[in-house]
Image (spheres, helix red, strand yellow):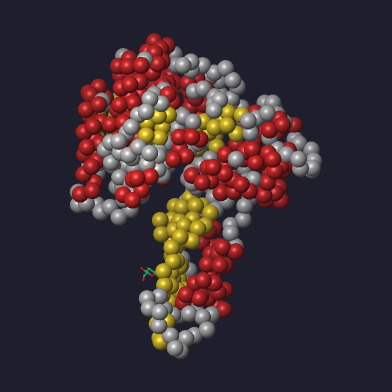
Amino acid sequence: MATKNNIPWWILGSLIVALASLFLAFQDSASLQGIYQFKFFESSVAPKYLFGSESVCKQAPILSPTNTQVEQFIRDKVEDPKYQTEIIEKLSGLIQIPSESYDDLGPIGQDARWDIFYQVEKYIKTKYPTVLKHAKLDHVNTHGLIFTWEGSVSTKSSKPILLLAHQDVVPVLTENVPDWTHPPYEGHFDGKTIWGRGSTDDKGYLISIIESMDLLMKSGFKPKRTIILAFGCDEEISGRNCARPISELLHDRYGDQGIYMMMDEGSFGLQTQFDQSFAMVSVAEKGYMDMQINVTSPGGHAANPPDHNAIGVLSEIIMSIENHPFPGKVTTKNPIFNFLECAAVHAPERSFPLNIRNKLQRVENGEVTAQVQLAKALDNMRYFFRTSQSVGKINGGVKINAIPELASTMVNLRLAVDSSVAEVQNHYENLIRPISRKHGMSFQGFYTEAPDDRRKISLSAIDALEPAPVSPVNAEAFRVLSGTIRNTLKPLITDTKFFWKLTQNIYRFTPINLVHNLNRAHTTDEFIVAEEFVREPLFFATLILNADDTVAK
Ligand SMILES: *[C@@H]1O[C@H](CO)[C@@H](O)[C@H](O)[C@H]1NC(C)=O
């Protein structure tokens, strides 16, 4: 199949980390148009946001490696049926190792459930002897793997390129196995599609990047810029066991901003939006926080209850939380704005709602009313620019005839890119403090101590993580990435938090059509389409070659 572009399409730096369900809402551009297109003309549209305008969302030129021999070798390879059969078998075999990670895993070395990762390592070594031969392998906390293929130029004058993937997968519950069309750990290939847990998230990515290194080694390519592959073991849980120590080792080795560019799995890939193909590179990541709220009050016999006990007060708090969601507002700090700008000038004119188009300039001018109006117009993709809150757990009471002494809840939050942990915590303190006053209870905020009172409301934050810094879209590295995407991918006709110190150029992108592939990640019938998967290494190899070309001679 040809890999040349013949339809215009566009690359942009866009969001994000989002949930699969939001992802579906995002997809629903047809309904967006249906709802908004017939709206009245509110104001004129700034010329720079008209279709075809060249002043925003400038596209990088197609970038071809100067080493055309190596490039041709890789291009021929990915079209070779024998290679295709082999790489599909490699992925299928890796899926057959159920490297599940669990929330309650103990430390590596103590909890035997980690031992499955020895098999993953052994498998990689067996399938990629050439990589083992030319790249140095470091182990980090036993199961974190770093392959370093050293370039001829020192890493001081030419920073390494880093490609990340994770070896672990989300567990499949035994009771869900019968729901799978093909058993989750069979790696079944039906001639078109490879099925199984991890096929997209993230074993397909892992095989693609190591395969690209393998192909480059076999092509005779000699890198100037050092190439690093790092495979974590716990992306689906916390990243503390592998991702963090990997980032620390790399930081010790290369220092602050010591990495040229870092690639990680993306949540969007190639997509059609507003009737146009877009390659969506995630350049930001929402923040995170779990909030625990405890309400304590003296117990006693149910025959002599207070008007409001701990469960009642907690209910009031939860209702108040849900009645005061975080306000939606689209600012230019949010990469979704960049996406809308690009869509305005590159999507067919009739497909991009005027109601959105005519607000862009005012949002850019910093008009808050326009920021809020734009958020309203985009309500079906609200969590791209809004902090989400979801009450996920509630506990309270032990016995029907006893007054509960403790009621508690856990709320899960994903912080908007332009928000912060402090802002979110303030919001809850301001919301809940009056409730404690109303009930004559003492209040303990996130950082304040309350007196030792038996009637108390207390808040605490678990795993609070600020939103990721937005990666630059004007950096050389982004130009290299965009140029590579345009060179190697066809338009559609159809854990990085520990690494922030290493580089600003963190781009999350999976070079396949994620609309249909990623829909099933984390659930039953996860799959990857073979004809896209087998060509992923062309993208990564070309990216490495193009990044190598930027090294000064
Ligand atoms: C809430 O109660 C649980 C269980 O007693 C305790 O582990 C936790 O630290 C408490 N949290 C706060 C915020 O007081």
Q: Residue furthest top?
A: 69
- State whether residue 262 appears in this view: no
The residue located at (40%, 35%) in the rendering is 527
Query: In the displayed structure, does residue 520 sit left or right of residue 29?
Result: left
The residue located at (51%, 22%) in the rendering is 490
Q: Residue furthest bottom?
A: 304
Query: In the displayed structure, does residue 136 sit left or right of residue 308?
Result: left
State the image coordinates of residue 281 (x, y, percent, origin top left).
51, 34
Query: In the displayed structure, does residue 451 sit left or right of residue 472?
Result: left
State the image coordinates of residue 430 (x, y, percent, origin top left).
56, 67
Please identify the quarter of the rendering in which residue 49 is found: top right
- Work out whether 298 lies above or below 380: below
Pick the front one: 436 or 499: 436
Look at the image and tell me in which quarter the C terminus lies. Answer: top left
The residue located at (23%, 48%) in the rendering is 113
Pick the front one: 444 or 174: 174
- Work out whether 359 lies above or below 419: above
- Work out whether 207 lies above or below 315: above
Please identify the quarter of the rendering in which residue 301 is found: bottom left
State the image coordinates of residue 5 (x, y, percent, origin top left).
54, 18
State the image coordinates of residue 214 (x, y, percent, origin top left).
31, 22
The residue located at (41%, 44%) in the rendering is 523
**Which quadrant of the picture is home to ligand 1?**
bottom left
